[in-house]
Image: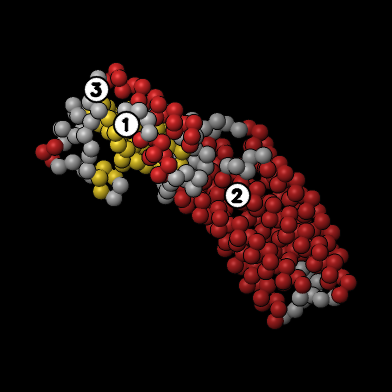
Amino acid sequence: MHMVATPNSKMQRVLQLSMVLTLAYVGATFYFGLRAHSLALISEAGHNVSDLLAIVLSFVAVYFQARPATDQKTFGYQRAGVLAAFVNAATLIVLSVWIAISAIHRFSEPVAVQPKLMMYVAAAGVLMNGTVAALLWKSSGDVNIRSVFLHMLGDTLSTAAVIAGGAVIFFTGMSWIDPVLSILIAAMILWSSVGIIRETLNILLEGTPRNLELGEIRQAMASVSGVLNVHDLHVWSLGSKSHALASHVTIAEMPMSECGNILTDIKCALRDRFQITHTTIQFEITGCETTHGCAAPPEPETVGAHSHGGHDHHGHTH
C-alpha cells in the first residue's frame, strides 16, 4: 500500500505568516544594526536570514509531504521535511562559526555601539520571534517543524539577551558586551543545530528510531503464540513520525489459512506497543542464513527453494 501524507493547510498558513514576519524583521535588524554599529544586531539579522530560509524550506517540505505517493515515489515525499531540517541545521552551523569569528575579531578592534537602538530593535525581535515560535509550538513534534521552532525559540532568547546587553552597555559603557553576546548567540545556534543534524542523519541513513529498542521489538514479536524465531529484523523511519519494519518470522508448518491469526497478532503488538503500522513480515518454516543481521543471498542452486514463491515459505505479506 502506498503511504500518503496528509495535507496540512493550517501549517502552510502558519509558515506563510512566519515568512512575512521574519522577512520584515531581517530588513529592520540589518538596517538598524548598521546604524547602531552593533555586531549583535547584525548577527541577529544573519541568524534571521537563515530562519527565513528554514521557514521557506519547511514550507516547501510541507507542500511536498502533502503530495500522494506514485509508482516512482512509492513512499511519497515523507522525507522532504527531514531533508529540509538537515539543510536548515547545516546552514546554522556555518552561520554560528561566522558569528563567532566576527565577534572575536571585534575584541581586538572595539566599535562603539548605540545601546538604546539595540534595545528597541531587539524588543521588536522578541515580540516577532516569540509570536512565530508560539504558532509553531503545537506542531514541534515533527522534526521539520521542530527545526524551525528551535530557530525561532533561539532567536527569542538571543534577542532578549541583546536587550539585556544593550542595557548594560547603556549604564556602564562596556562595549565588549556586544561581541560577548554574539558568541553566546553563536553557541546557542550551534547547540540546537547539532541535535537536529544527528536526528535527521539517523533518519536519512535509515537507522533505528531513537525512541525504539530493537531487542524489545524482537522480544514482543517472538512472544506471539506460534512464532518460533524472529530474524533479519529491520526498523527505520519513513519520516519524523512514521516508522516501518521488515522481518523474517519462523513458524511451524501449517496451512496458509492458519497463518492469518499469527500475522494479525504480530501486527497488533507492533502497532499497540511501538506505533509501527507499516510492516513487511515474511513467514518461513526453516531458518535462513544471515550475514551481519541481514538475510544472506541464497546459493544459485537453492534459489528456487528459498524464493518468495517457494514451498518453504508462506508468502511475503503486508
SS for dot 1: strand
Q: Position of residue 55 (x, y in %)?
A: 63, 47
SS for dot 2: helix
Q: Earlier in the sequence, mark 1 or mark 3?
A: 1
Q: Position of residue 268 (x, y in %)?
A: 44, 28
Q: Residue furthest left?
A: 301
Left or right of residue 96, residue 40 in this image? right
Q: Amino acid at mark 2?
A: Ser
- Measured in 3D between alpha carbons, the distance from the residue under mark 1 to the one under mark 2, in whole angstroms, is 41 Å
- Measured in 3D between alpha carbons, the distance from the residue under mark 2 to the one under mark 3, in whole angstroms, is 50 Å
- Measured in 3D between alpha carbons, the distance from the residue under mark 1 to the one under mark 3, in whole angstroms, is 12 Å
SS for dot 3: loop
**Residue lying at 72% horizontally and 71% vertically, measured from the top left:** 180
Look at the numbered discs 2 and 3 and tell me whether their residues touch, using CB distance below 8 Å. Answer: no
Q: Position of residue 84 (x, y in %)?
A: 54, 48
Answer above or below: position of 192 versus 267: below
Which is more foreground, mark 2 or mark 3? 3
Left or right of residue 182, residue 240 in this image? left
Left or right of residue 314, residue 98 in this image? right
Q: Earlier in the sequence, mark 1 or mark 2?
A: 2
Q: Amino acid at mark 1?
A: Val
Q: Residue furthest right?
A: 171
Quick one: quadrant of the N terminus? top left
Q: Residue furthest bottom?
A: 108
- Badge 1 density bin: few <14, some 14–19, many ≥20, Cα 10 Å: some
Q: Amino acid at mark 3?
A: Met
Q: Which residue corresponds to mark 2? A: 147
Q: Which residue corresponds to mark 3? A: 254
Answer above or below: position of 296 versus 94: above
**Residue lying at 61% horizontally and 57% vertically, measured from the top left:** 192
**Residue lying at 67% horizontally and 36% vertically, measured from the top left:** 13
